[in-house]
Amino acid sequence: MSILSFRTLLAIVMIMLPRTGVQAQALREIGRTAARNPVLVEPRSVRREQSQVHATVRVRFAKAVRAPGGDWWSSRTRLTLDCTSRRVKVLENWYYGDTTWRRITSHHVSGLPAFGTVMGGSMTSVAYDALCPVSTSPTK
């Protein structure tokens, strides 16, 4: 087998191997914010626990958000939704300088996470509407 054939075979095998980590997860679009930014969920991150839903949600910004550490083009947020009271607790978030979630420009872990109100049109509102069952939503 020649060196070129071996390299070609090796390249094909590497492509065929299952990917690991974040890239292996197929993101699923669950809606759009009021600013028309697509909101996606990592399906394997979704866990239901009584009236709460734990998930990791991502957003691709249509326009860059200016920030001191560099422009933000996308975000990734770990959160907990309380489906009975329409409240959200943000546990951790990352902001990225690209739309592929590779170049982190900001990372924040909430010191004392607490539940807050889900704001209409926001990423948390889209996540709440998509992930919380209708039967546990509060009456309006």
Image (tube, rainbow, N blue to C red):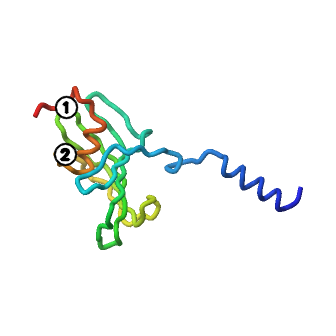
Front position in the image: 38 or 105: 38
Q: Position of residue 105 (x, y in %)?
A: 38, 66
Q: Secondary structure at mark 1?
A: loop
**Residue marked by disc 1:** 137
Q: Is residue 53 above or below residue 11?
A: above
Which three-letter amino acid code belongs to the residue tagged 2?
Val
Query: Label 2: how many residues lie within 10 Å, few (<14), some (14-19) or many (20+)?
Result: many
Which quadrant holds the N terminus?
A: bottom right
Q: Secondary structure at mark 2?
A: loop
Distance of label 2 from label 1 (alpha carbons): 12 Å
- Decide if residue 98 is on the left or right side of residue 77: right
Which image quarter: residue 130?
top left
Which three-letter amino acid code belongs to the residue tagged 1?
Ser
Front position in the image: 68 or 7: 7
Identify which residue is drawn at 18% across, 38% down.
86
Identify which residue is drawn at 23% across, 51% down.
122
Q: Position of residue 7 (x, y in %)?
A: 78, 59
**Residue marked by disc 2:** 118
Identify which residue is drawn at 77% across, 57% down.
8
- Decide if residue 32 is on the left or right side of residue 7: left
Front position in the image: 104 or 73: 73
